[in-house]
Amino acid sequence: MTLEQLKAQREALQAARFNGVLTVKAGDKWVTYKSDAELQAALQDLEREIAKVEGRPRARRIRTYAEKGL
């Protein structure tokens, strides 16, 4: 997919999510998501793909955990 197609698909998913709709037209077919969490996961996948196409580095998370040893 081209960058423009990815961005258009992201905008369609964002608009559907903000309107509370779980059915979105993707190209020439309709996609129905089961939940808002599934729709959010699709948006995150699109964001990663757009970042990859644009050449931006991946966002990384560092989590620190601490435990008190006994």
Image: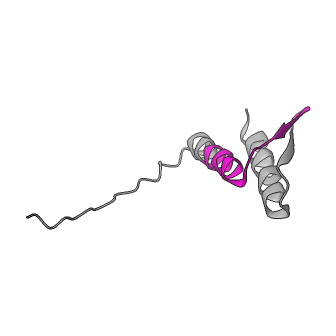
Q: Residue at x 19, y 64 (%)?
A: 67
Residue 59 percent across, percent down from the top left: 47, 53
Q: Nearer the viewer, residue 23 or 69?
A: 69
Residue 28 percent across, percent down from the top left: 91, 32
How many discs mark residues in the rendered view?
0
Q: Residue at x 62, y 49 (%)?
A: 44
Q: Residue at x 68, y 47 (%)?
A: 38
- State the image quarter where residue 64 is shown: bottom left
Q: Nearer the viewer, residue 66 or 18?
A: 66
Q: Is residue 64 above or below residue 24?
A: below
> Does 14 appear in magenta?
no
Please identify the residue farthest to the right as the structure is shown: 28
In the picture, which quadrant includes the C terminus? Answer: bottom left
Q: Is 57 left or right of 39, judged from the image as shown?
A: left
Q: Residue at x 83, y 55 (%)?
A: 16
Please identify the residue farthest to the front as the structure is shown: 70
What's drawn in magenta, residue-wise? Answer: 27-47
Q: Is residue 14 above or below residue 27?
A: below
Please identify the residue farthest to the bottom as the structure is shown: 68
